[in-house]
């Protein structure tokens, strides 16, 4: 009788846990839907990074106002803004546009090439109270405004390297070892 009671208690515990998890998660959904997590920007460029929303289980917006974004950590010269927009949260199978926003990042006054992690905090004012969410984005920055002719640039580098070797002015590990 003790074993049967133990199995019954165990089954009841598992059932109550699963029902709490399934019922508890159906109240609302939020997301910063990132289609891209790695971003490359040149000086002066901007890109729409994500759509931002907070919805109920029946696809209604729970936002009181447009969410705000703050850069917690990131490269200098990069800004992030959220502009009010109608968005369609397709991730949750919603079909109608709702109130939300679009997250845009821009690069200005970039002086050096860099690859770094940018950490953003998005703040939501919802009908259920204030909420926050953090997102990490890998961002590569380039200072050039116009594209270079890659083939001629590589050819010049190769020609310069050959000239240094032939003239004896090369200081790479292989040439220095031969001297």
Image (cartoon, rainbow, N blue to C red):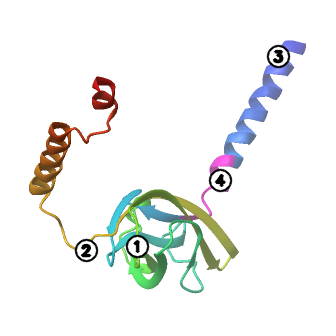
Badge 4 local density, few (<14 within 10 Å), some, or many (20+)? Answer: few
| Mark 1–mark 2 distance (CA, rounded to whole Å) | 10 Å
Against 69, is 37 above or below? above
Against 123, is 91 above or below? above
| Mark 1–mark 4 distance (CA, rounded to whole Å) | 49 Å
Residue sitting at x 48%, y 80%: 81
Residue sitting at x 14%, y 41%: 162
Residue 94 position by quadrant? bottom left
Residue at disc 4, secondary structure: helix
Q: Earlier in the sequence, mark 2 or mark 3?
A: 3
Badge 1 local density, few (<14 within 10 Å), some, or many (20+)? Answer: some
Residue 1: tell me if it is visible.
no
Q: Earlier in the sequence, mark 1 or mark 4?
A: 4
Residue bearing mark 1: 110
Residue at disc 1, secondary structure: loop
Range of magenta residues? 21-30
Residue bearing mark 2: 145
| Mark 4–mark 3 distance (CA, rounded to whole Å) | 28 Å
């Amino acid at each position: 009788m003790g074993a049967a009671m133990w199995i019954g208690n165990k089954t009841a515990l598992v059932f109550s846990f699963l029902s709490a998890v399934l019922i508890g998660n159906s109240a609302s959904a939020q997301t910063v839907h990132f289609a891209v997590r790695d971003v490359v920007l040149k000086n002066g460029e901007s890109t729409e990074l994500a759509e931002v929303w907070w919805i109920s289980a029946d696809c209604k917006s729970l936002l009181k106002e447009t969410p705000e974004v703050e850069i917690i950590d990131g490269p200098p010269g990069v800004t992030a803004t959220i502009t009010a927009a109608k968005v369609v949260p397709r991730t949750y199978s919603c079909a109608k546009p709702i109130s939300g926003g679009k997250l845009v990042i821009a690069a200005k006054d970039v002086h050096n090439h860099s690859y770094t992690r940018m950490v953003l905090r998005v703040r939501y004012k919802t009908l259920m109270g204030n909420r926050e969410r953090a997102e990490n984005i890998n961002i590569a920055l380039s200072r050039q405004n116009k594209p270079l002719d890659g083939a001629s640039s590589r050819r010049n580098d190769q020609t310069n390297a050959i000239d240094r070797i032939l003239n004896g002015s090369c200081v790479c590990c292989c040439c220095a070892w031969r001297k």
